[in-house]
Image: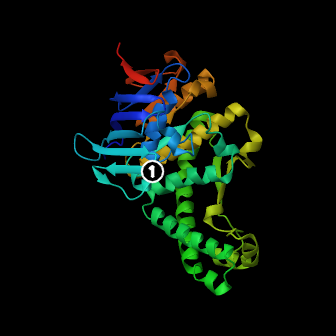
Amino acid sequence: CPSMSLLSLRIQDFRNLTAVELVPSPGLNLIVGANAAGKTSLLEGIFLLGHGRSFRSRHPERLIREGADACTVVGQVAGGGGGSGLTVGIERSRQGWRARIGGAPVRGLAELAGQLPTQLINPDSHRLLEGGPQYRRRFLDWGVFHVEHRFLGAWQRYMRALRQRNASLRAGEPVQSLNLWLPELVAAGTDIETYRRAYLEALGPKLSATASALLGTDTLSLRYLPGWPQSYELAEALERSLSRDRMLGFTQHGPHRADLTVYLGDHPARERVSRGQQKQLVAALILAAGAHYTEVTGRPCVYLVDDLPAELDAEHRGRVMAQLARQGGQAFVTAIEENAVALDAWDAGRTFHVEHGAVREMVY
């Protein structure tokens, strides 16, 4: 199967990056430079190409360099369009998004996400353990989306029915009107739960393997909370909460409220691990999702690792880098200094220096 990696990358007027062009290694790419030089912005640009959104800001207009009208990120993705790869691009102007795949406009940013599966480990990754349920749902649904092609359609149907039902609830419409959306909500919601549970079951062995490599224990597991009381089917849960939903003006139960509990052995991990172990545990979860994607599709994903030295001591940094090398695929790893990251597990790679928003390859 073809690899899913970036053959080339072009970034224009994105954050503090004026005009960047680089040809990355298909393996390790080390991005070095002082704080605020633009290292994280470079990773953010790649993430934008692989997710259709930023990992740093909910305000897309902030991605545009001061004084510019728009920002663009364009990549050639291997495995898509012959030897030269498939061109994938996204532009953000003050008016909104425009994205293209192979020159053709895309209808939704989810289409973009399918072209360059990208995983991120950064100083905010601890939210996967400590933050609200939305972080764990996002982690879960990245994996389901990339290995179960029916998931996106089910999710879109579910969200459409949910929006309609919530609008009816807010408007105080009669029960008959509310019930119009129920069959679609239940059918799509049940499909989503089925896909998520199947994915988590398949992910289990990969979780054990990455936890063993990074934490020295294979007892890492995930328990799924579907978003409604588990003693009921979704239809019954919605029926039982109808009067309260009408009072609150929104739908309390359903897969949009799902969560995961991360366990080490028989105990929730949050109660058991130190801050340093927490970072390793979250890295294990993210790398397991990437490894499972590769096993199912035969294609490695792109890993973005921002500021690993700030997160972990030398030994644990080494474990993460060795696991990344074992999983194959392309990695972009930032550090202030080259010697802060253990490179001995990698055959070869390229090093890029970022300074004042400009990027150049360092050739030895």
Q: Position of residue 94 (x, y in %)?
A: 46, 46
Q: How is the image coloured?
A: rainbow
Q: In the visual, does 17 lie left or right of 209?
A: left
Q: Position of residue 295 (x, y in %)?
A: 43, 48
173 or 34, which lies in front? 173
Whether 350 is drawn above or below 151: the answer is above
Find the residue positioned furthest to the front.
67
Horizontal side, residue 18 vs residue 210: left or right: left
Closest to the observer, 348 or 166: 166
Residue at the bottom extreme of this rendering: 176
Looking at the image, residue 45 lies above or below residue 339: below
The residue sitting at 62% across, 25% down in the picture is 310
Residue 138 rendering spot, x and y as whole percentages = 57, 52
200 vs 162: above or below: above
- Who is closer to the viewer here, 61 or 279? 61
Furthest residue to the top?
364
**Mark 1: amino acid:** Gly
Q: Is residue 249 visible?
A: yes
Most foreground residue, 235 or 195 = 235
Residue at numbered disc 1? 96
Picture quadrant where residue 259 is located: bottom right
Q: Residue at x 44, y 33 (%)?
A: 331
Question: Residue sitting at 35 percent across and 44 percent down?
Answer: 89
Q: Where residue 14 sits in the image (x, y, percent)? A: 45, 35
Q: Is residue 303 visible?
A: no
Residue positioned 57% across, 46% down in the render: 58
Quadrant position of the C terminus in the picture: top left
What is the number of callouts on the image?
A: 1
Residue 22 in the figure: left or right of residue 339: left
Q: Which image quadrant is residue 242 in?
A: bottom right
Helix or strand or loop: what does disc 1 sit on?
Answer: loop
